[in-house]
Amino acid sequence: MYRYELEIQSQKGSFPSSVTKESLFYQPSTRRKPFLVFERGSDGTVKGSNLFPIIQTTPTIKVRPNTSVISTYAQLGHQIALEFQKALQGFQSNLWEADLTPPSLIFLFRQHPDLLKDANRELRRLDLRLLELTVSDNGELIFKHQGLNEPIPWGFESNGTQSFIRSFPRLWIALNTGGIAVLDELDASIHPEVLREIISWFWDPQKNRHNAQLFFSCHNVLLLNELQKEEILLCEKTPKEGYTRMYRLADIKGIRKSEDFVRGYWHGAYGALPNIG
């Protein structure tokens, strides 16, 4: 298992401008203490290791403030950095990009016929009364519904169905490449049962043959009892500074695996409840 740490400094009201700390650790299953793979100083110098030898390039190279060690060394042909870069290519997220638009979806469905085929299979399984999603000859997304004689264009489809279809390509790519899907507000307009189904794909060894991972944020408290305490991260605003603090449920002392996490959350045992009024 690898642990990647990144600390970014930004000027007030602007996009993050510089990396102040960056490091990578490797945790083998036979050892308690992780190995340091590389560490980057605030001045951009990089300390390597046997796992990440920097002698292959230039020992005194400095990384630019707005770039990562992995991308910089990959451009210089560093073999280990290239392997990490390849692994990160399976990273799928909606954090820096807007939701997939109909033109983007049409492009993906035309480039990957299996993506459209699998999307239709899941839409039928989810009992949405949808028979088929197709791309028309004039380049529009069209829905065929059970009991309706005429197809429904994208703009008239429900927000829930649209939200599912926008999320599906990123989930599909991660599952088929062994990548990582990081999705913000995955529960937006999606029914709780559909959300549970999506999460189950990553637990199912038949669907997740390449050990893909899913990280997501949501406001659906009922999901707490579907997850292990080690899988749950809670977020709350600090009262004075106003920034968001994140912590693991498993790091709270006295939390048992068998307890009712939903009940504990609503009783304020874990924090992360909004202070209204």
Image (cartoon, helix red, strand yellow):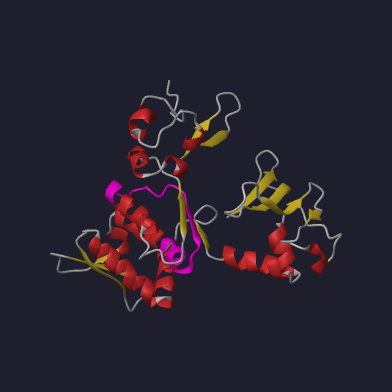
Specify the quadrant of the image occupied by residue 82. bottom right
Query: In percent of the image, x 62 and y 47: which residue is there?
Result: 32
Count of numbered badges drawn on the protein: 0
Is 228 part of what is drawn in magenta?
no
Work out which residue is located at the far left of the displayed protein and give it.
147
User: Which of the pair 27/16 is nearer the observer?
Assistant: 27
Residue 85 is left or right of residue 103, and the answer is: right
User: Which of the pair 31/166 is nearer the observer?
Assistant: 31
Instruction: Answer yes or no: is residue 73 visible.
Output: yes
Residue 249 is left or right of residue 58, and the answer is: left
Instruction: Answer yes or no: is residue 57 visible.
Output: no
Is 186 part of what is drawn in magenta?
yes
Work out which residue is located at the far bottom of the displayed protein and give it.
137
Measured as percent of width and height from the top left, residue 217 is found at 45, 45
Query: In percent of the image, x 57 and y 54: which residue is there?
Result: 29
Residue 27 is left or right of residue 219, and the answer is: right
Measured as percent of width and height from the top left, residue 185 is found at 43, 47
- Is 65 drawn above or below residue 151 in the view shown? above
Residue segment shown in magenta: 170-193
Measured as percent of width and height from the top left, residue 250 is found at 48, 37
The image quadrant where one finds the C terminus is top left
Measured as percent of width and height from the top left, residue 94 is found at 49, 55
